[in-house]
Image: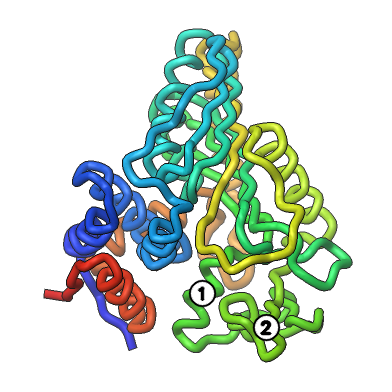
Amino acid sequence: MSKTISSEQLTAQVAQVIQAAGSSAAEAQKVAANLVLANLSGHDSHGVGMVPRYVDAVLEGGLKPNTSAKATVDIGTMLALDGQRGYGQVVGEQAMQMGIARAKEHGSCIMTVGNSHHLGRIGHFAEMAIEAGLVSLHFVNVLSRPVVAPFGGGDGRFGTNPCCIGIPLQGQEPFVLDFATSRVAQGKMRVAHNKGERVPEGTLIDELGRPTTDPGVVVVPQSNGLFGALMTFGEHKGYGMAVACELLGGALSGGGTWHRPADTARTVLNGMLTVLIDPARLGTQQSFAQEANAFVDWLRQGPAGQGHDQVRIAGEPERAARKARAVAGITVDDQTWAEIVEAGRKVGCAVTTG
């Protein structure tokens, strides 16, 4: 079972819960709008289903409402920020605004953010850079119960550690590559579990290290109290990228890496290394625009493979989903909605569908 809600109504409902949990009205609106944009983009894993976890994290004390990013180093072309456990949707935007300003001034900026609560969909930050005409690269680690197994390993040792690259294309929609280094995002397993669905083979191992298609093994404790784990994409290649994200997003940012037994905390902290480049200052802007468009056009001119209607580039599926869901509304399964209602109850906010 599920219900379909307009993006405006869903944003208003979520903002009420976030505000009841201690955020200002402006912060609650920003967090809610960001979550709903993830749903609109087709990434329900990073959408409103995160609200129950955010509320629990606030109640735990691991997520600090109304907290801003604090610059610890700012030398123009290099910027280091402490998220101070604030909402990642707020801290991340503040960090990007600062980094974008430095890159526009100097031509580039290397920026780190440590100790931010869950940054959400990293593609949002690449889209901010693209709007300013910048190329951006993002490497992110996750400090929470480790849900991804190393290649050749039998239990979770690190998070879904996303990587994102945004590239503006002159006169056409941009390239936005945004992916978890796990085979799929952890949030997608939560959504599948709530819907009672199975997942493709090769995605998961259970709490004993055996292959399984049951997403519940990474969502709820199993009979022995342990969890299963996600696999990395591309076997050893995705594993290598995940380790790079941990070292760059976690160790280099000062936010830290995961190297301790799992706990039951609901707080999710992220560290991020971002590189911003202004093509206009690199001296190759004309050839960059021409060659980038020529290559993308070349890709699209190719014949569609079996089971596909055309060749696409990263970012297109999200833009298509936004158009469709803006009209049709956002579908939320009953289990996820019940969890949002319960989260509201915890902070004295009645959530309705009216």
The answer to whether residue 42 is seen in the rendering is no
What residue lies at 75% left-to-right and 48% top-to-bottom? Answer: 241
- Numbered label attached to residue 190: 1
Give the mark nearest the N terminus, 1 or 2. 1
Query: Which residue matches tag 2?
Result: 225
Q: Is residue 22 left or right of residue 201?
A: left
Q: Residue 307 at what x, y percent from top left?
A: 58, 72
What residue lies at 68% left-to-right and 61% top-to-bottom? Answer: 182
Q: Residue 143 at what x, y percent from top left?
A: 62, 52
Q: Residue 133 at what x, y percent from top left?
A: 44, 24
The Cα–Cα distance between marks 1 and 2, rounded to whole angstroms, is 18 Å
Q: Residue 102 at what x, y percent from top left?
A: 48, 15
Question: In the picture shown, does residue 230 fall above or below 283?
Answer: below
- Numbered label attached to residue 141: none
Q: Quadrant of the C terminus?
A: bottom left
Looking at the rendered structure, the secondary structure element under dot 1 is: helix
